[in-house]
Amino acid sequence: MKNKKFKKTIALCLIGILPNLTIAQIPTTDVAANAQLVLLNSNVATLNSQMATLNATMGKLLAQMERNVTANSSASKILSQDLTAKRTPASYVMGSPEMNELYELKDKIIAAYKGTRKNLRSFTNLEKVEKQRASGILADALLQVSALVSQGSQIASTGEIIESADRLSALRSILEKMDGLLEAVIEVNTSLLQKNEHRKAVHSLIKTN
């Protein structure tokens, strides 16, 4: 009888404790859930911050890319214009004093050539070998003049990429060579004239004596 009473007493105690145990676990579960929510919110906030930074960086990158595209486009346009200008000789090159002098020198050299060739036929006191040597020099000079004039015209009008200043510089170099050729032809003529006149005077002196 006493055992039954004791068991009943224990059962009543357990029945009274169980609800309290259940109630005590509820706050523990809420705290864990709240901690997870706080952690989740923190992660979301961090992610939002990273996304904002990424968006700002992407915006700067896109803006820089647009500036680069604009700059490249401008550079390409300027380069194209520059190349076109270099391929198209300026009008002042075609009508420059250098071009005028080029053709004037050509005419002078041809005139000197013709005059010397005429003198060669009339210089009776020169030896045959002297006339042949002079004829060779004159023929070579004429060939060089033809090549130089052609070269000068090509430099002035070519569509190749050449600065106008460089065209004029090249023309001046050609003019120097042509000046040298003119002097060479004149020197040949002067030398032949002197030899012929000297020998003519010697022959006259011999005949007189």
Image: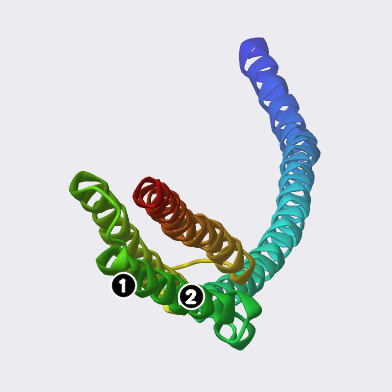
- Look at the image and tell me in which quarter the N terminus lies: top right
Above-or-below relation of 180 to 118: above
Q: Residue furthest front?
A: 209
Q: Is residue 20 left or right of residue 155?
A: right
Q: Residue at the spot x=51%, y=66% of the render?
A: 162
Q: Quadrant of residue 35?
A: top right
**Which sits in the foreground, 171 or 46?**
171
Which residue carries the number 1 mark?
118
Above-or-below relation of 45 to 75: above
- Look at the image and tell me in which quarter the C terminus lies: top left
Where residue 152 appears, x then y in whole percent? 44, 70
**Which sits in the foreground, 55 or 69?**
69
Q: Earlier in the sequence, mark 2 or mark 1?
A: 2
Identify the secondary structure beneath mark 2: helix
Where residue 5 appears, x then y in whole percent? 68, 19
Q: Residues within 10 Å of mark 1 (few under 14, many from 20)?
A: few
**Which sits in the foreground, 16 or 156?**
156
- On the question of residue 173 being in view, the answer is yes
Where residue 207 appears, x then y in whole percent? 34, 51
Q: Residue at the spot x=76%, y=60% of the render?
A: 56
Identify the secondary structure beneath mark 1: helix
Instruction: State if disc 1 and disc 2 touch (CB < 8 Å).
Output: no
Q: Residue at the spot x=48%, y=60% of the render?
A: 186
Which residue carries the number 2 mark?
108
Q: Residues within 10 Å of mark 2 (few under 14, many from 20)?
A: some
The amino acid type of the residue labelled 2 equals: Lys
Where residue 151 appears, x then y in whole percent? 39, 67
